[in-house]
Image (cartoon, rainbow, N blue to C red):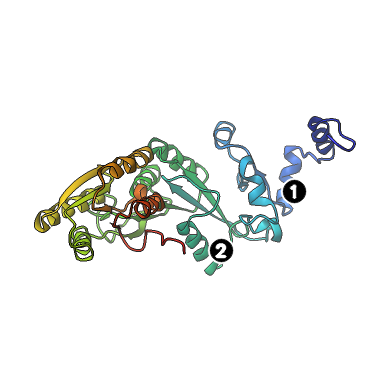
Amino acid sequence: MTGRFESVDDLLADARSRLTRLRPDEAYGEVHAGARLVDIRPSWQRRHEGEVPGSLVVERNHLEWRLHPRSANRLPLAVEGQRAGKVARIGYLLLAPLTEKPSAERQAFLQGLREIGYDEGRNVIIEYQSAAWNRELLSDLAAELVARNVDVILSPGPQASRAAQAATKTIPIVMIVEVDPVESGLVASLRPRTNVTGFSGNMAGLGGKRLELLREAVPQISQVSVIWNPGNPAANSEWKETQAAARTLGMKLESVEVRRAEDFVAALPRIARRVPVAVVMIQETLTYAYRSILAEFTLKNRVPAIMAGQSLPKPAG
């Protein structure tokens, strides 16, 4: 070490000696006077010791990049401070991992909030809960959001939506699903009289159309590898449609089933060894998260590929 400190421990001891530590009753008074209390404990500790009502949860590993005034991912309160008034709390429950850099979908969600006057950390707090592909965790994570008394739960994907439904019958749930919500049992009708609303990206009938587009673009196509998740009801429906279209078009399909993240990563080398004429990826929560990997694979191996919408990233250059 250089300067007046002999070690890192000495530097930390000096920094801690200049901290103002509040007793619980003093912290309570500061909050009621307008201060914002930030809870940096990890989720397991909050579950064990209890939540602090009204606090802003920023776990220790995220503290610097969420509260540093110069961080690209800072909360607005890091530079603006907290204004008086009611602060809404949104629970964000998802199966996929939560990345430090917001995904395009999460960026759109935050932008939409800003457009209607809600800024994260100023007048809305977003409680993120990610299962990181471990479906067994979704029920506990949904229950934790309910325990935090959030005002609404946003649940991208059918698995997260079912977990949220099982956890509460009173907190509004906004689901974003690829399945037919009635056929999959998420709601009884398209006008449900429950706490569930949202929208569906169900695209019934398009599985066969994609094969037709491939045949039109590459007439010599005879074999197609189809990457899909049998654990998703919507994917099952589209797989059946794709099979029917393949029979009509005289194509041979190879079923590449991916149920977990590791399945997807392992599938691509197998596909590369077989050198398929084309790849179709049936979109749902898991496969969509790995769309950029598929794009890199198809570009590297010069294999035609198709999936829903404009989901495959465009190559650079």
Cα–Cα span, label 1 and label 2: 24 Å
Q: Nearer the viewer, residue 193 or 132?
A: 132
The residue drawn where x is 27% and y is 60% is: 190
The residue drawn where x is 67% and y is 57% is: 77
Say what secondary structure mark 1 lies in. helix
Q: Quadrant of residue 308?
A: bottom left
Residue 93 is situated, as x and y percent measured from the top left of the image, at 45, 47
Q: Nearer the viewer, residue 294 or 196?
A: 294
Indicate the amino acid at tag 2: Tyr
Disc 1 marks which residue? 30
Q: Tell me, yes or no, if residue 244 can be seen here.
A: yes
Q: Is residue 277 above or below residue 218?
A: above
Residue 285 is situated, as x and y percent measured from the top left of the image, at 36, 50
Horizontal relation, residue 43 to residue 200: left or right = right
Horizontal relation, residue 161 to residue 125: left or right = left
Indicate the amino acid at tag 1: Glu
Q: Nearer the viewer, residue 28 or 97?
A: 97
How busy is the neighbourhood of tag 1: few (under 14 within 10 Å), some, or many (20 plus)? Answer: some
Residue 17 is situated, as x and y percent measured from the top left of the image, at 84, 36
| Residues at discs 1 and 2 in contact (Cβ within 8 Å) | no
Quadrant location of the N terminus in the rendered image? top right
| Disc number placed over residue 19 in the picture, else none | none
| Disc number placed over residue 118 in the picture, else none | 2
The residue drawn where x is 82% and y is 33% is: 13
Q: Quadrant of residue 302?
A: bottom left
